[in-house]
Image (cartoon, grey):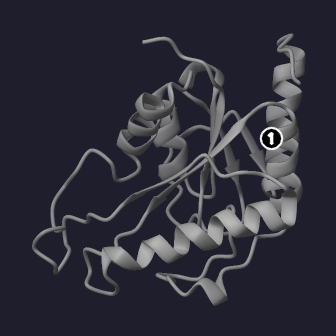
C-alpha cells in the first residue's frame, strides 16, 4: 500500500489540551499554551494532525466509551476555530489491565507506550511514519512514537513524574510547549531538505 502523508501524532492531555485528568466534559477542554500556534505551523508545513490518547477512564468505569464522541467533536472545533486546522483523526485506547469494566480490563497493543494507535492510524490514512513525528508530554508518548518508527518530541510541561529512561524513551527534542515542538519539527525538516508547502 502506498503512503502519501506525513503526520504529527499529538498526545491530547498535557500536550494539546490543558491537563484535566479523566475529563470528558467538552466545556472544560482548553487548548494548552502554544497549542494553536503549534498545530497551525505544523499544518502549514504539510503535516496532518492525528491525536492519540490513552483513555483508561473507560476501563476504570469513570465514563462510558460513548462520551469520547463529544470529546472528539470539541477537539475538531477547537483546532478549526483557534488555528484553522482540520483534525485528521482522534485515536484513543480505552483499555487498562487493572480496569474495573470487564470488557476493557486487559492488556492491549494500543495503550501507549505500545505503538498500536499510531500503527492503526498509519494504516487507515496511509501515513509515512518514517517522516512523521510523535509529540507528547510523557516518556510513554516518546516510546510509542519510537516503537512505531517516528521521530519524537517531549513537551516537558511538568507532567512526566517517573522519568524511566531508555533508548526507546529518549526524544529527539525536548521543548516547553507545542509551539516549540512545531518549530523543532519544521526546523528538522528544513535541515533535512524536506520541501514544505
Q: In the visual, does 35 lie left or right of 163?
A: right
Residue 14 on image: x %, y %: 64, 68
Q: Nearer the viewer, residue 68 or 52?
A: 68
* Residue wearing tag 1: 43
Vertical placement of 157 versus 149: above or below?
A: below
Q: Is residue 144 left or right of residue 186?
A: left
Nearest to the observer: residue 186 or residue 1: 1
Quadrant of res 8: top right
Residue 94 appears in the rendering: yes
Tell me what residue is drawn at x 45 percent, y 38 percent. 121
Q: Say what secondary structure mark 1 lies in.
A: helix
Q: From where the camera sits, is residue 34 visible?
A: no
Q: Quadrant of the C terminus?
A: top right
Q: Is residue 101 above or below residue 116?
A: below
- Residue lying at 54% horizontally and 56% vertically, measured from the top left: 163
Q: Can you give x and y, in whole percent of width and height, for residue 17 in the image?
A: 68, 70
Amino acid at each position: 500500500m502506498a503512503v502519501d502523508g506525513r503526520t504529527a501524532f499529538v498526545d491530547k492531555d498535557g500536550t494539546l489540551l490543558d491537563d484535566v485528568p479523566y475529563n470528558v466534559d467538552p466545556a472544560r477542554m482548553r487548548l494548552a499554551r502554544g497549542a494553536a500556534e503549534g498545530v497551525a505551523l505544523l499544518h502549514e508545513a504539510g503535516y496532518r494532525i492525528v491525536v492519540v490518547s490513552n483513555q483508561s477512564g473507560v476501563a476504570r468505569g469513570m465514563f462510558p466509551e460513548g462520551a469520547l464522541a463529544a470529546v472528539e467533536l470539541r477537539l475538531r472545533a477547537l483546532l478549526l476555530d483557534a488555528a484553522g486546522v482540520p483534525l485528521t483523526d482522534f485515536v484513543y485506547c480505552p483499555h487498562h489491565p487493572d480496569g474495573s469494566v470487564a470488557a476493557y480490563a486487559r492488556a492491549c497493543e494500543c495503550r501507549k507506550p505500545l505503538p498500536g494507535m499510531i500503527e492503526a492510524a498509519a494504516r487507515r490514512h496511509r501515513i509515512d511514519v518514517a517522516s512523521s513525528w510523535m509529540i507528547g508530554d510523557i516518556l510513554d508518548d516518546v516510546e510509542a512514537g519510537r516503537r512505531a518508527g517516528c521521530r519524537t518530541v517531549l513537551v516537558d510541561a511538568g507532567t512526566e513524574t517517573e522519568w524511566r529512561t531508555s533508548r526507546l524513551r529518549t526524544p529527539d527534542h525536548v521543548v516547553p510547549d507545542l509551539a516549540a515542538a512545531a518549530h523543532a519539527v519544521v526546523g528538522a525538516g528544513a535541515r533535512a531538505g524536506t520541501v514544505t508547502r
